Image (cartoon, coloured by chain):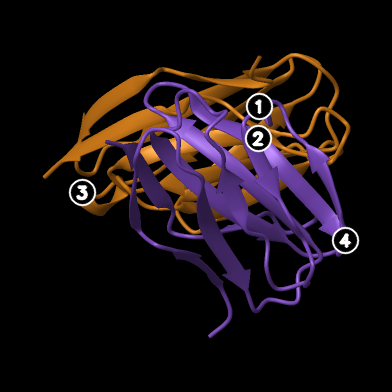
Amino acid sequence: SQQGEEDPQALSIQEGENATMNCSYKTSINNLQWYRQNSGRGLVHLILIRSNEREKHSGRLRVTLDTSKKSSSLLITASRAADTASYFCATDGGSYIPTFGRGTSLIVHP
Amino acid sequence: DGGITQSPKYLFRKEGQNVTLSCEQNLNHDAMYWYRQDPGQGLRLIYYSQIVNDFQKGDIAEGYSVSREKKESFPLTVTSAQKNPTAFYLCASEGTGANYGYTFGSGTRLTVV
């Protein structure tokens, strides 16, 4: 079974709006990662957040982690059509071997 | 430039055939992984190797085999025992320390014909 599960499964927004997607997991982790996948391509690493961190930023991306709720969120600010992709969270369940959720499909309309 | 190369991009297999998917990296990463991706299923771990000449089964290893004779290479063989091999296969590598995330190849799409 998947360790991390993303929510929502699909998200459709207009260019310029913010996009928020969430990840929930079941067991303790060492770190949580977010990845992006364009259709038919490999995954691209976005951000890694460690279990002792609460928030990280990278450009227009903001990731939060709440270990007490076993959840994380990825916020993309001022979205662009080029942000259209699937976004996955990966959690390691304490083993350093990440497992991936089913992903959130984001569509940004120009 | 450093990266991971998967080949071929598209592969067609007849029933009962074994096929081998190539994965090569020039990142000097110790750990390498194979994932299978089906629509709506996310990524599932097939095999992983954290060091040369050693590898471990993942969640769905049945019907697959791997080797790790060189640090740079981690080929995956899809055997005839894999009853539903049509999927998108992704190879990834990770440097020592597990701090910087995976680097993925661009994938191989395998179709049974």
Q: What amino acid type is highlighted by mark number 1?
A: Ile
As displayed, is residue A43 above or below residue A28? Answer: below
Same subunit under labels 4 and 3? no
Q: Residue at x 33, y 42 (%)?
A: A85
Q: Provide residue B6's location: percent of width, then percent of height.
A: 48, 63
Observer-side mark, 1 or 2, equals 1
If the image is split into quadrants, where does the N terminus of chain A sit?
top right
Which tint was used for chain A? Answer: orange
Residue A32 in which image quadrant? top right
Q: Check residue B60 in the rendering and tell me which mark sits there, or answer none.
A: 1
For disc 3, the marked residue is A81
Marks 1 and 3, how far apart at CA: 35 Å
- Quick one: label 1 or label 2, which is nearer the N terminus? 2
As displayed, is residue A12 above or below residue B76? Answer: above
Q: Is residue A51 left or right of residue A40?
A: right
Q: Residue at x 75, y 77 (%)?
A: B28
Marks 4 and 2, how far apart at CA: 19 Å
Marks 4 and 1, how far apart at CA: 20 Å
Marks 1 and 2, how far apart at CA: 6 Å
Q: What amino acid type is highlighted by mark number 3?
A: Ala
To which chain does the residue with label 3 belong? A
Q: Provide residue B54's location: percent of width, then percent of height.
A: 88, 54
Which tint was used for chain B? Answer: purple
Marks 4 and 3, how far apart at CA: 44 Å
Q: Are marks 1 and 3 in contact (CB under 8 Å)?
A: no
For disc 4, the marked residue is B53
Answer yes or no: is residue B2 visible: yes
To which chain does the residue with label 1 belong? B
Q: Name the element at disc 1.
A: loop
Q: Using a 10 Å C-alpha cutoff, classify the residue at mark 1 as few (fewer than 14 neighbours), some (14 to 19) or many (20 or more).
A: few
For disc 2, the marked residue is B45
Q: Are marks 1 and 2 in contact (CB under 8 Å)?
A: yes
